[in-house]
Amino acid sequence: MSDQPRDEDVLVIPDAWRDALLPRRGGRTPVPETAPDGAEAERIRHALEVARPDVETVLAYGTTDRRLALAAEGYLRGEPDALGAAVVAVAETRIRTGAPYATDPAWVDFLAAEHGLAFAARAFAEFDGIQAPWHDSVADWPWAVLHDGWSTRRAHWTLNEPGRRMRALLAAAGDDEYAAAVEGLARHRGPRLQRLVVSFLVPTRQDWVDECCDEPEPRDYWASDEPLLLWCALGDEARLERLGPLARVEYGTRLRPVVATLVGELGAAAAPALAAALHDETWYHDPAEAAGRRRALLEGLGAIPTDEAFRLVIEALGRPQVLVAAAEMCERFPARALRVLPEFGGGTSERARLAAGLLNACARARPELLERAGSETRAAVEAVLEGMVAEAPAAEVPKALLKAAGTATPVWAPPGALPQVLLKGRERALPLAATGHLIGALTRATPRRKPNAAVRDALDALDPRSLFEFGWALLGLWRAAGEPDRAGWALAQLGWTGGDEAVRRLGAMARSWTGQEGIRLPLDGLDVLAGSGGDVGLIQLHLVAAKAKPKRLKKKAAKLLAAAAEARGLTPDQLGDRLVPDLGLDAEGGMALDYGPRRFTVGFDEQLRPYVVDGSGKPRKTLPKPGAKDDPELAPAAYAAFTGLKKDVRAAAPEQIRRLERAMCEQRRWETGDFRALFVEHPLLWHIVRRLVWLHEDDAAGEGGKVTAFRVAEDRTLADAADETLAPPAAGGVRIAHPLHLGEAVKAWGDVFADYEIVQPFAQLGRPVYALTEEERGASVLERVKDVTVPTGRLLGLERDGWARDTAEDGGVQHALVRELPGGTVRIHVNPGFPVWSPADWKEQTIGAVSVRGGRAPAAPHRFDALDDVTASELLLTLSTLTEGSVQ
């Protein structure tokens, strides 16, 4: 597009529309001289000779509509039958192409050259009333050609290239020839769709158009092609108002010529209807169709040279693809942009942010227009842009950003529409051109690729916080534009610009994703997490694997974690132990918050909820906001640190507590050195560790070696149930004690914890224990909860504890929950089951048998005595909790 401003009050048809604009006799756009193409006519003449035997075979079928067959047979014998010509054209095209809705504009040229324009128009008016079957060959057709095309209310020939060609020939015809065609078409205005086809071909007959506008809309009118045909025939604003807003147009790929014609003929009057259609996507389930529809509507609005059309586009900012259209309108109408955008640039909404960015880009790109603008416009622009940091001189700009080194900038990411990138020290900002070069460099990013040395040096010279905000906003623009670049660099660049904060946000985005729509974005985001190379990225993958709802996300995160663990020579569980964040806590597991004249200390309760203690030792429910007497720099920083800590703990704490409870149930063991390094000395986990009873097993434990129960005291020493200090073990293993391990000592440990007012993070000492009966131990099926009905949500909640839905059976329903346990695979059978498409559709489930498969040896029978006592107790606890309060 030209750098020179265009006349902003004149409709300029974009070059891309030249081939889409439907010609109109006597319309606002000139009609070029057009005549039938002899070469195309000759092509059809030859094709008809080749296909004639097959056409005659089709016409001879007993299932072929006899009226159509007789007309076509007469045409093949040389009779001037317009309906017969249409039948032959549709049949030949279908036979030649093998496509059920195939069309060929060359038939228009053939009929016009062979029989004259009036005959061609009459034949064309019959095309969409003829339907051919779907099968691939003539021999397979169960019926031939049916006259039910009008009832389908689809106009494949008219709304594609043949219709454009027929309309062009009619628009360019001489007066006498055109009059003859119109007279002939009057005899082909039968069913409603055919009347609309005729109005499409000769829109000069506005009385015919009025008849169509005045007819009541039939059922599912907006799901047919009828509105598109009527749009193309409208001649003035009055008929536009009678027709109403363009809504629910199903075929976005065929909308472009309609919109182009509408705007070309009606101009500004078309804007409200196009905007109404832009906001209505009720019937759009196919993303490709929705994108095509939005693109056509935005192209139409973007060509209209009025403030109203400009406002209508800006009002839609934030919806897919609108940002690109808005940026193009700003380039096409820069003076209008400076005048209108300030109306939308205030506030904190996404639309306000995007509008302010567009205004910034426009003002910086065309300063001469701002200087010539009125005082009110200048004041409004300056108000929106207030607070911009001065640009750095060229001498301070990193060398790699002084010239374009990657792809000069995508249309959806104008540099001025993004937050300023500041140099270190935050006193100067990158110039607009350098920001564009930075975007170009970022287009090379992939999840696994690191920036080259020059780009790395440039990134190191920038302020990290502003670089993160820039990178995150760049991702936002990409999404707002409808994700036009499928290479995904707009997401991958966060690995270069975003640092740990971007990694945390990507992890949070993946964890909060609820369904399959748009899931490619969080899936690709997991690659960015894995490619970040740091523990923060792996921590986020661990949280996604544990908490994400879509299975595709959980599985991919687990796969990436397993690969990372293998690369480090660890198991996934061992890697998880090493990925617990310390959240910036000190060695004592706390955090000092300095307000200057006031100081506070952060502690944690048994659920890892942070609390605050003031300087006098008095606990507070929350940290107070900085006051007038507090240090203006220290206090806000401390308050922000505590706010961030609460957010990080909310994400990490529940999973860590569940992880340790699961480790107790699964009797996981750590080497003594790992126990001290990963738990006792960990500043966050320490708050859980000291609230549990642990077991130390020496290396001979499996052969009668010593097992010692202990707790970790407040000073990190070890103590037994008599509160006697124990020497730290030098070897052996440590595990979390299950009540079955402690036996009668459970009461003594309970007294110790009560004396010290230690509240446990999960049920350990007070945990219910269960045992299988002798009969159950020898069985493969457990029936103690059989026929109990429970809420479906309660059953699905078991997935958080390692259970999974079984393979779907016929009808796509899963009839069991499955878990691999030491000693066998256990299934909880349920009825009616979980539909894979919506597992919670049925509100209640009746439990059937609980079965086990597997045993101590390959040849062993499937029996519950293959489970050890702890595993059996935990299974029975799960079943008891599951059925609590339910009636059998």
Image: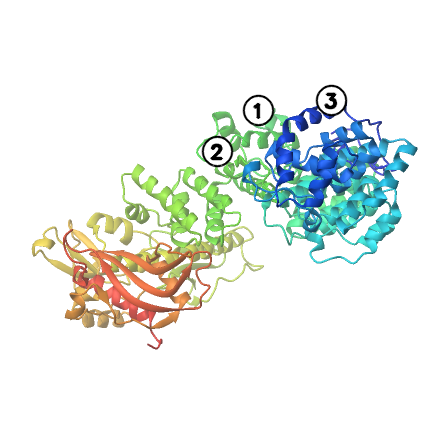
Label 2, on which residue? 446
Image quadrant holding the C terminus, namely bottom left
* CB atoms of marks 2 and 3 within 8 Å: no
Q: Which mark is residue 39?
A: 3
Q: Quadrant of residue 745?
A: bottom left
Where in the figure is residue 597, as x and y percent of width and height?
50, 58
Secondary structure of the residue carrying numbered label 2: loop
Secondary structure of the residue carrying numbered label 1: loop
Q: Nearer the viewer, mark 2 or mark 3?
A: 3
Where in the figure is residue 463, as x and y percent of width and height?
54, 38
Q: Quadrant of residue 298?
A: top right
Q: Which mark is residue 405?
A: 1
Q: Nearer the viewer, mark 2 or mark 1?
A: 2
- Counting residues from the start of the chain, the first of labels 2 and 1 encountered is 1
Please identify the residue farthest to the right as the structure is shown.
176
- Rate crowding at label 2 as few (under 14), some (14 to 19) or many (20 or more) other CA atoms within 10 Å: many
**290 displayed left or right of 852:** right
Q: Give the alpha-carbon distance from disc 2 to disc 1, as whole Å.
A: 17 Å
Image quadrant holding the N terminus, namely top right
Q: What's under tag 2, amino acid-wise?
A: Thr
Q: How is the image coloured?
A: rainbow
Residue 52 visible: yes
Where in the figure is residue 751, as x and y percent of width and height?
22, 72
Q: Give the alpha-carbon distance from disc 2 to disc 3, as whole Å.
A: 50 Å
Q: What's under tag 3, amino acid-wise?
A: Ala
- Counting residues from the start of the chain, the first of labels 2 and 3 encountered is 3
- Rate crowding at label 1 as few (under 14), some (14 to 19) or many (20 or more) other CA atoms within 10 Å: some
Q: What's under tag 1, amino acid-wise?
A: Ala
Q: Nearer the viewer, residue 470 or 389?
A: 470
Residue 265, compared with residue 773, is above or below; it is above
Q: Quadrant of residue 726?
A: bottom left
